[in-house]
């Protein structure tokens, strides 16, 4: 279950910000800015609210924001409910709780995954590209706490996901949070970008071929070795979740960390690009390269070795 496993995202992000050695492991490492680490955790644990009717029987305090950190028993009950219903074919989208959508529904692109089995790789990639654009622009401060998501009409994925709400950037990223975190919302957005990128390297999320190390991805004068092309995106809903968690382990991350085009080297390039405030138009080719597809029409599925056979 997400959040109950090793803090691999935190370690990857701390390494991206220059940490080296075993000291980078564990939730206590703080090389990366605190708000960036909050953003990295956001994809797994976005704050949300539910009505008393929606959360009936789950032990939730619906007058307060729901997160794993603040209401763990409620969160686990909701996750199990979403998991059970998704295994039977339930679909989640706008109007459902964020927890249901991010792990089992239309927002699985936050984890570099398809929203359902059969979704074409090119469609999942487009949602990821839209998310990277949204988070990159937010990370540069182009969108502020008061920006209403439905006003970002040029981004089809954001409009489809949040266009029927009055949510602002504040509500998406810092609902129920303190003013200190809200003052660093651009860092939170960058952290959520890094989470999705990091997930695209995890075998339970997507299948990549091995990188040759001969190709590079470019953004202005910044370049980095290209990762292997994506062979297929996976969908979480009907996977063997224990197998998925094993593929998300620190051991797997450390093995991949040695490969050309690894997520730490790529992340460091993105940190440099953000420091230079490179605009999205300059960054788009790099993100497109990082998500190179071997075959755009490959349909999503659980992935080899991740099928739920029960």
Image (spheres, helix red, strand yellow):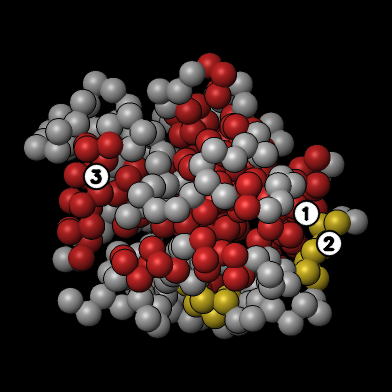
Q: Is residue 285 above or below residue 188?
A: below
The numbered mark at residue 280 is: none
Q: CA distance from mark 2 to mark 1?
A: 7 Å
Q: Residue at x 52, y 68 (%)?
A: 252
In the figure, residue 244 lies in which quadrant? Answer: bottom left
Name the residue at the right extreme.
Answer: 221
As helix, strand or loop, the secondary structure at mark 2 comes to: strand
Q: CA distance from mark 3 to mark 2?
A: 41 Å
Q: Please state if 239 lies on the left or on the right of 277 as rendered.
A: left
**Residue 159 visible, this angle:** no
**Which image quarter holds the N terminus?**
bottom left
Cβ–Cβ under 8 Å for marks 3 and 2: no
Q: Where does residue 88 sit, x and y in percent of width and height?
A: 16, 66
Which is more toward the observer, 184 or 282?
Answer: 184
Q: CA distance from mark 1 to mark 3?
A: 36 Å
Q: Residue at x 68, y 53 (%)?
A: 21
**Among numbered discs 2 and 1, the one appearing first in the sequence:** 2
- Residue named by callout 2: 223
Cβ–Cβ under 8 Å for marks 2 and 1: yes
Q: Where does residue 103 sit, x and y in percent of width and height?
A: 35, 54
As helix, strand or loop, the secondary structure at mark 3 comes to: helix
The numbered mark at residue 76 is: 3
Name the residue at the front extreme.
Answer: 22
Q: Where does residue 289 sit, x and y in percent of width and height?
A: 71, 68
Q: Is residue 139 above or below residue 306?
A: above
Which is more toward the observer, 165 or 5?
Answer: 5
**Among numbered discs 1 and 3, the one appearing first in the sequence:** 3
**Residue 307 visible, this angle:** yes
In this rendering, the count of numbered labels is: 3
- Residue named by callout 1: 269
As helix, strand or loop, the secondary structure at mark 1 comes to: helix
């Amino acid at each position: 279950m997400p959040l109950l496993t090793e803090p691999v995202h935190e370690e990857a992000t701390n390494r991206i910000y220059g940490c080296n050695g075993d000291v980078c492991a564990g939730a206590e490492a703080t090389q990366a800015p605190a708000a960036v680490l909050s953003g990295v955790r956001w994809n797994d644990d976005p704050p949300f609210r539910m009505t008393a009717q929606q959360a009936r029987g789950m032990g939730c305090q619906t007058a307060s924001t729901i997160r794993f950190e603040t209401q763990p028993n409620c969160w686990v009950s909701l996750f199990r409910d979403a998991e059970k219903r998704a295994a039977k074919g339930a679909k989640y989208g706008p109007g459902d709780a964020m927890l249901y959508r991010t792990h089992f529904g239309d927002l699985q692109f936050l984890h570099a995954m398809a929203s359902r089995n059969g979704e074409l790789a090119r469609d999942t990639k487009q949602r990821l590209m839209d998310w990277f654009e949204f988070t990159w622009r937010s990370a540069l401060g182009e969108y502020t706490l008061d920006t209403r998501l439905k006003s970002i009409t040029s981004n089809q994925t954001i409009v489809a996901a949040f266009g029927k709400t009055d949510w602002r950037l504040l509500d998406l990223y810092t609902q129920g949070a303190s003013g200190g975190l809200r003052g660093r919302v651009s860092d939170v957005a960058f952290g959520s970008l890094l989470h999705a990128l990091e997930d695209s390297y995890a075998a339970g999320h997507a299948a990549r071929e091995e990188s040759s190390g001969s190709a590079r991805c470019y953004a202005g004068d910044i370049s980095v070795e290209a990762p292997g092309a994506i062979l297929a995106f996976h969908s979480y809903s009907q996977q063997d979740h224990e197998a998925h968690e094993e593929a998300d382990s620190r051991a797997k991350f450390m093995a991949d960390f040695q490969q050309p085009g690894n997520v730490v080297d790529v992340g460091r390039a993105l940190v440099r690009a953000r420091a230079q405030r490179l605009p999205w138009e300059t960054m788009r080719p790099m993100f497109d390269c990082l998500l190179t597809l071997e075959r755009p029409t490959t349909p999503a599925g659980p992935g080899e070795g991740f099928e739920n056979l029960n």
